Amino acid sequence: MPQDMDRGITGYHAHIYFRPETKPAAAAVREQLGAMFDVALGRWHDKPVGPHPISMYQVAFATREFEKIVPWLMLNRQGLDILVHPETGNDLEDHRDHALWLGEKLTLNLEMFQTN
């Protein structure tokens, strides 16, 4: 059964992944995102954090920005791997079931979201 689109996507996160050798590209993408779009740029994480297997930073944006930001990332990601997911209040489903990937799909550590 289809889910109601208005039921609860409150925003989106894009996680921009990088390695030491690709950090300059990540910095360029970050600078352009901050200059061109209405986004909240998260901190640099130079080590894996949360479910993320490698270094990354988060970019948070409102639902109205999706149609501008995601196509821009598709064309301007500079070879970086990017996870885009909605914010619905269910972190496990948002990262596992509702995510889209630009570049390589990395294996996330989703165990932290699973409740027993």
Image (spheres, rainbow, N blue to C red):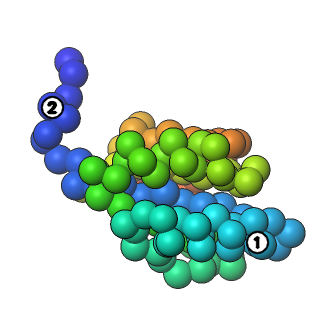
- In the image, residue 4 above or below residue 89: above
Q: Quadrant of residue 40?
A: bottom left
Q: Residues within 10 Å of mark 1 (few under 14, many from 20)?
A: some
Is label 1 in a helix, a strand or a loop? helix
Query: In the rendered structure, which disc, 1 or 2, sits on the residue that comes first in sequence?
Result: 2
Q: Which mark is residue 23?
A: 1
Q: Which mark is residue 4?
A: 2
Q: Quadrant of residue 115?
A: bottom left
Q: Is residue 29 left or right of residue 24?
A: left
Q: Which mark is residue 64?
A: none
Identify which residue, 91 or 116, lies in the foreground: 91
Residue at horizontal 65%, vertical 51%?
A: 76
Identify which residue, 90 or 81, lies in the foreground: 81
Circle 2: residue type: Asp
Residue 59 position in % (x across, y down): 47, 66
Q: Quadrant of residue 25?
A: bottom right
Residue 39 position in % (x across, y down): 40, 68
